[in-house]
Image: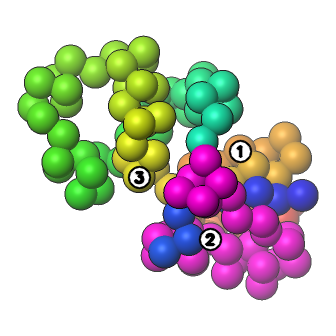
Amino acid sequence: MTTVYGIKNCDTVKKALKWLDDNGLNPQLHDYRVDGLDPQWLAKMADKFGWETLINKRSTTWRGLSDEIKNTLNKDTALQVLNEQPTLIKRPIVIAGNVALIGFDAAEYQAKLKS
């Protein structure tokens, strides 16, 4: 099973879902806004990708954070902020068996999911 974690109205999530569907990987969307966010799952993703990678610094949510929060982030505070504001998480996160990907890059998806 291929699970795509993100938000359904995100253009990058839509691109990933389409690519996965077009390549027969039957993606299932886990929408943070609808399905919630498990803090333990988020901590695992921080261990897998690094907490810095999880933060989408191009998002409007990031731009809305205070400079104090931005400048004092560490793993613990980042996980707390990400749990409180899941739209700050870089999207999508794709889990397919033992493969985990973050963001959307068709070439990377091809190499890691279709090999």
- Amino acid type indicated by mark 3: Thr
SS label for mark 1: strand
- Specify the segment rendered in magenta: 10-36
Instruction: Decide which of 82, 21 is in the foreground and name it.
Output: 82
Which of the two discs, 2 and 3, labels the residue nearer the N terminus? Answer: 2
- Does label 3 or label 1 sit earlier along the sequence? 3
| Residue placed under numbered mark 3 in the picture | 87
Horizontal side of residue 15 vs 67, given as left or right: right
Question: At which x and y percent is residue 2?
Answer: 82, 59
Q: Amino acid at mark 1?
A: Ala
Queried whether the magenta region covers residue 44, the answer comes back as no
What amino acid is at disc 2?
A: Ala
Q: Position of residue 71 (x, y in %)?
A: 16, 23
Q: Quadrant of the C terminus?
A: bottom right
The residue that label 2 is drawn on is 16
In the figure, is residue 68 to the left or right of 7? left
> To which residue does mark 1 refer?
100
Q: Position of residue 51 (x, y in %)?
A: 46, 28
Mark 2 secondary-structure assignment: helix
The residue drawn where x is 78% and y is 79% is: 21
**Would residue 6 be visible to someone looking at this image?**
no
